[in-house]
Image (cartoon, rainbow, N blue to C red):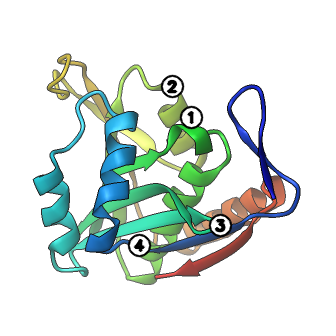
Amino acid sequence: MKEREADGQIRYARAPCVTVRRATIADLERIMEIEVTAYSAPWHTQTMRSELEADPERKVYLVAEVDGWMAGYIGSHVFAGEVHIATVAVAPRYQRMGLGELLVLTMLAYAVEHGCDYVTLEYRISNRAAEQLYQKVGFIPVRVRTSYYIDNGEDAIVAEITNIRGSRYRKKLERLIERWGLRHEYDVHVII
């Protein structure tokens, strides 16, 4: 049973069921609802449609559902041993509940399981929450892309994790997933 608190956050009387699964074209409308609330320069619906309809081995999109309601998504491009995380978003009412981190960890596990060598992404230089999350899971800033964001010309930090197939990072990822589970009381199901 969920209850909305005065601060707008949702609190649960029991552990909610969180399912992380492959996104489908049927998820497009809800993904776009989240997209336009999460980003000042959201992707166009047709761009997202193309991503979801692309070869699922090359474009990997996952959604996180809380008790059957889509709370967030992550999308990546897979090529030449690299996973490039192109987008991550969580609906405002589900933010600060660990779901963005769960999506990133799940994508990292996907990359490891599919034999990728490294993972890359970009984030706004002003986005301290993203920076903290990405550094927590092992991303290292490697360069700046100047004037990357079209809405305001803000720079982007390019970050990466290399050698994710190595035993050192695999062990780190296992620990990160275990710690996430200890911090968050969810009944988690990953179906990808």
Residue type, label 3? Asp
Nearer the observer: mark 3 or 1; the answer is 3
User: CA–CA distance between discs 3 and 1?
Assistant: 27 Å
User: CA–CA distance between discs 4 and 1?
Assistant: 21 Å
User: According to the image, label 2 marks what residue?
Assistant: 128
Q: Position of residue 160 (x, y in %)?
A: 37, 49
- Proximity of marks 2 and 1: CB atoms separated by less than 8 Å: yes
Q: Earlier in the sequence, mark 4 or mark 1?
A: 4
User: CA–CA distance between discs 2 and 1?
Assistant: 6 Å
Residue type, label 4? Ala
Secondary structure under the numbered disc 2 in the rendered image: helix
User: CA–CA distance between discs 4 and 3?
Assistant: 26 Å
In-image side of 86 versus 112 (left or right): left
Residue type, label 2? Arg
Circle 3 residues within 10 Å: few <14, some 14–19, many ≥20: some
User: According to the image, label 3 marks what residue?
Assistant: 67
Mark drawn on residue 111 = 4
